[in-house]
Amino acid sequence: MDLFVFSTSGPDVARLVGGGAAGAVIDWERRGKARRQLGEDTQINHDTPRDLRAVRSATAARVVCRVNPVGRWTAAEVGRAVALGADEVLVPMLRRPDEIAHVVDLAAGRCGVAAMVETQDAVEAVDALVARPLARVYVGLNDLRIDRAARTGRPAGLFEPMVDGTVEHVRARVAAAGHPFGVAGLTRPDAGDPVPSALLMAEMDRLGVDFTFLRRSFHADTADRDPAAEIGRIHAALALAGTRDARRRTEDRAAFARAVAACAPVAVPAPVPA
């Protein structure tokens, strides 16, 4: 499984790639994000074109630039990312197939285009989304949770799509189209909250996940360790997960579902009128 790191530090990226990371992500997405994620425990990065240039100069590994959701600014962002050496642009918050088609046309073969499925609209339109030539497709669980909660009016759990069949459905459509598939994020094998990394790795192996990101907590979880060595431990744990027999896979799937259920949000009852 390819591991990508969000980082603006050229030296850090070079060390992590040396330890087994597949590449780096520079994050330009911020338009509307603070409003969309208000009150959520999420992270908004403020990476710049200068950061992309620095990381590109530090590594020959794959460099992905996440741009803003599609809008009148997209042509300029794609052009700048290409000029600064991005191998791919990663497009968030897709809702309609014509949005990813527009970015593919803008890229015109100068770089790869990767799609994020992180709205219910994108889930429902996945067949049309993946019909385009894409570098990869990633299910973004945080924004999908927020989008679903806004639609239904009930709190949604982060990992619910991994147990209710949503991720499995998207994975099947992405695989049928021949694109690499990603979901969730990883940290040390012996860490992970609220769902242990070991169980998440087991489920990702069962799903046939091709790539993922090192999650925000990876940096905190490795603060007193060698992060590059920890990437090797993640790869070793993933390889071990791939050796499980059918019985163990079934047991781990059930344990993952229990862990997800245990951290499910509880709806707060509406106040009773006086």
Image: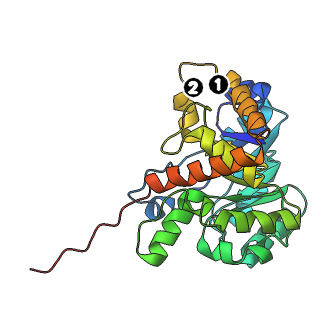
Q: Secondary structure at mark 1?
A: helix
User: Is residue 193 among what the camera can see?
Assistant: yes
Number of marks in the image? Answer: 2
Q: Which is nearer the eye, 55 or 266? A: 266
Q: Residue 264: percent from the left, percent from the top? A: 44, 58
Left or right: residue 234 versus residue 46 is: right
Residue furthest to the left in view is: 274
In the rendered view, tell whether residue 127 sits above or below residue 224: below
The three-letter code of the residue at mark 1 reads: Pro
The residue located at (78%, 52%) in the rendering is: 208
213, above or below 126, in the image: above
The alpha-carbon separation of the residues under discs 2 and 1 comes to 6 Å
Q: Position of residue 200 (x, y in %)?
A: 62, 45
**Which of the 4 image quadrants contains residue 50?**
top right
Q: Nearer the viewer, residue 241 or 103?
A: 241
Q: Relative to residue 222, is residue 83 depicted above or below?
A: below
Query: Which type of secondary structure does the marked residue at label 2 adopt?
Result: loop
The residue closer to the viewer here, 177 or 30, is 177
Residue of label 1: 227
> Pointer 2: what residue?
222
Verify CB contact (< 8 Å) between mark 2 and mark 1: yes
Point out the residue furthest to the bottom here: 273
Q: Quadrant of the N terminus?
A: top right
- Residue at image position (74%, 26%) is 232
